[in-house]
Image: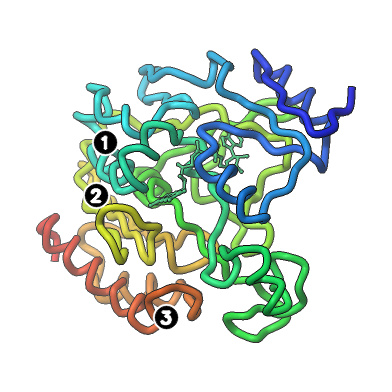
Amino acid sequence: MIADKAYLIPNSVGEAIEMARINKDTFKYLAGGTDVMVNRFQGNEESSCLIDLTKIESLKGISKEGETLRIGALEILEDLKLNTFIKEEFPLLIEAALAVGSPLLRKTATLGGNLLCENRCLFYNQSEWWRESVGYCLKCEGDICIATQGKNACFSELVSDTAPALIAMDAQVELIDVDGITRIKVEDIYSGDGVYPRNLTDTAILTAIILPLNRAFRGSFHKLRERESLEFTSLTSAVAVDKNGKLKIALSGVDPKAIVVEGTVESDKAELIKQAVKGSRAVDNDMYSRKYRREMISVFLNRSFNKLNIL
Ligand SMILES: Cc1cc2nc3c(=O)[nH]c(=O)nc-3n(C[C@H](O)[C@H](O)[C@H](O)COP(=O)(O)OP(=O)(O)OC[C@H]3O[C@@H](n4cnc5c(N)ncnc54)[C@H](O)[C@@H]3O)c2cc1C
């Protein structure tokens, strides 16, 4: 049955994918809804069918699987701090999760939803009448980017705060789609195209986040935002080093995708910072200027190297 303005509640991943397949092009998956429902309110999301994933038990729970920790995509951000494995092995993830929104949002928002939340831009996340008044933009039926005046690329930014922390600790995501199960690195979710920022098909369901255990990660997390209490990121940085001296930097808020730089504790830190700044395609589409955010990349990374005692 093709749903017209429907709210569907599947009980299994298979059922959800079948509903999605039938309603292709007109549906949206819903987890905590803290991103989807706000975008609908602003007229940026208009699917006629919502598929609510929250009754699917297989998307919940945190369990050890061999040398990895499996976190169900529906795990609530605020609850991650209660899990012993996460507390002991991945405190960086807790720090990142607690930097998302406000306590009320975090009690509803899921980890999977946070990785897949929509990219943002100062000129896109506005009311319908505001966007209409400027002739829309590349991300919403217009033919020009308001931030750059260019016609070729949209620079809406990845704003997930947990993505940099998970990427820095070599996390993967498990996806189920019509043709089976796959696992990819978290950074490979993101396409770099601001209009279509994910490499996933519409019907794919993110089932779990997989983290490697026993790597003894030490980490450092920073978030640039106007208000500590409640604000999307203007730059999030996470740096993790493991027991073998592997070092991984991940940034969000300064590009349509995550910026990732890898090295070791012995690497030339100035060179790593240079790569991170060079990789970022930040434009003036945020409350903070492009110049300031790019400068803050160096500030945050230097602070992180200092904290981790690897300068
Ligand atoms: C005022 C406000 C402040 C915010 N501040 C921040 C912030 O500081 N940092 C931040 O990162 N975010 C912030 N957000 C955005 C949002 O609250 C979070 O990103 C949240 O984690 C999204 O999770 P959710 O479960 O509510 O996702 P939803 O809104 O349910 O879904 C988000 C997206 O993911 C897709 N999706 C969800 N789960 C799955 C799944 N398992 N498989 C496939 N697709 C799925 C949905 O279709 C949708 O496209 C804020 C939102 C508001 C309203």
On screen, residue 158 versus residue 88, left or right, reads right
Which three-letter amino acid code belongs to the residue tagged 1?
A: Phe
In the rendering, at what x and y percent does residue 306 appear? 12, 63
Q: Which mark is residue 143?
A: none
The type of colouring in the image is rainbow
Q: Are marks 3 and 2 in contact (CB under 8 Å)?
A: no
Give 66 or 59, whichever is nearer the viewer: 59
**Disc 3/disc 2 C-alpha distance (Å):** 28 Å
| Front tag of 1 and 2 | 1
- Splitting the image into 4 quarters, where does residue 70 fall? top left
Q: Residue at x 31, y 46 (%)?
A: 96
| Front tag of 3 and 2 | 3
Give 271 or 5, whichever is nearer the viewer: 5
In the rendering, at what x and y percent does residue 212 appear? 36, 32
Local crowd size for mark 1, using a 10 Å CA cut-off: few (<14), some (14–19), many (≥20): many
Query: Disc 1 marks which residue?
Result: 90
On screen, residue 79 versus residue 266, left or right, reads right
**Disc 3/disc 1 C-alpha distance (Å):** 31 Å
Q: Which mark is residue 290?
A: 3
Query: Disc 2 marks which residue?
Result: 241
Give 54 or 7, whichever is nearer the viewer: 7
Q: Quadrant of the N terminus?
A: top right
